[in-house]
Image (cartoon, rainbow, N blue to C red):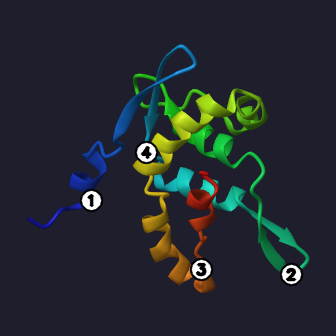
Amino acid sequence: MLLGKEDILKVQDLAYEDVEAWGGTVRVRMMTGSERDAFEQSMMKLEGDKVTREMANMRAKLLVRTICDENNKRIFSDKDIGLLGDKSAAEIEKVFEVAQRLNKLTTQDAAGQEKNSESGAVDTSTLASQES
């Protein structure tokens, strides 16, 4: 069946997963396309005419875009990145691993993007390599 505009727009396609962290349950969801673009943009820094990776608070940058309430709405804003980054690394890592998997930011997923990095796509392979 060929989908039309309305068919595509009415689909609820943001999967989520509940994670035990910080003494309770945290809901983590897939990012929207716009959130993914903003996340990838936040990982880049322009220095003169050269683009470099900006890894500071990488995990918190992902989590503010993926932790949500029961209605799949973000509970953190980009202004909260530093605050969330100051929380326990162990708890952040638990939630980050789920956000990374749901949003296909794993080593295997990044391998495909690595091929496109010369054409302007972001190479997220560092995300997975930073896990350890």
Marks 1 and 3 sit apart, C-alpha to C-alpha, by 30 Å
Which tag is nearer the camera, tag 3 or tag 2? 3
Residue extending furthest toward the left: 1
* Closer to the camera in the image, 69 or 6: 69
- Label 1: which secondary element: helix
Q: Amino acid at mark 3?
A: Ser
Q: Amino acid at mark 2?
A: Asp
Is disc 1 in contact with disc 4, using a CB cutoff of under 8 Å? no
Residue at 60% x, 29% y: name it. Answer: 91
Measured from the top left, where is residue 27 in percent x and y? 44, 28
Measured from the top left, where is residue 55 in percent x and y? 74, 56
Marks 3 and 4 sit apart, C-alpha to C-alpha, by 22 Å
Question: How many neighbours does mark 1 have within 10 angstroms: few (below 14), some (14-19), or many (20 or more)?
Answer: few
Measured from the top left, where is residue 123 in percent x and y? 60, 71
Q: Amino acid at mark 4?
A: Met
Measured from the top left, where is residue 13 in percent x and y? 31, 46
Marks 3 and 2 sit apart, C-alpha to C-alpha, by 16 Å
Which quadrant would the N terminus be assigned to in this image?
A: bottom left
Residue at 41% x, 47% y: name it. Answer: 102
Residue extending furthest toward the top: 23
Residue 30 circle label: 4
Residue 49 circle label: 2
Residue 5 circle label: 1
* Closer to the camera in the image, 12 or 81: 81
Marks 1 and 4 sit apart, C-alpha to C-alpha, by 21 Å
Is disc 3 in contact with disc 2, using a CB cutoff of under 8 Å? no
Residue 117 circle label: 3
User: In the displayed structure, would residue 11 be above or below residue 48?
Assistant: above
Residue extending furthest toward the right: 48
Mark 3 / mark 4, whichever is N-terminal: 4
- Label 4: which secondary element: loop
Mark 1 / mark 3, whichever is N-terminal: 1
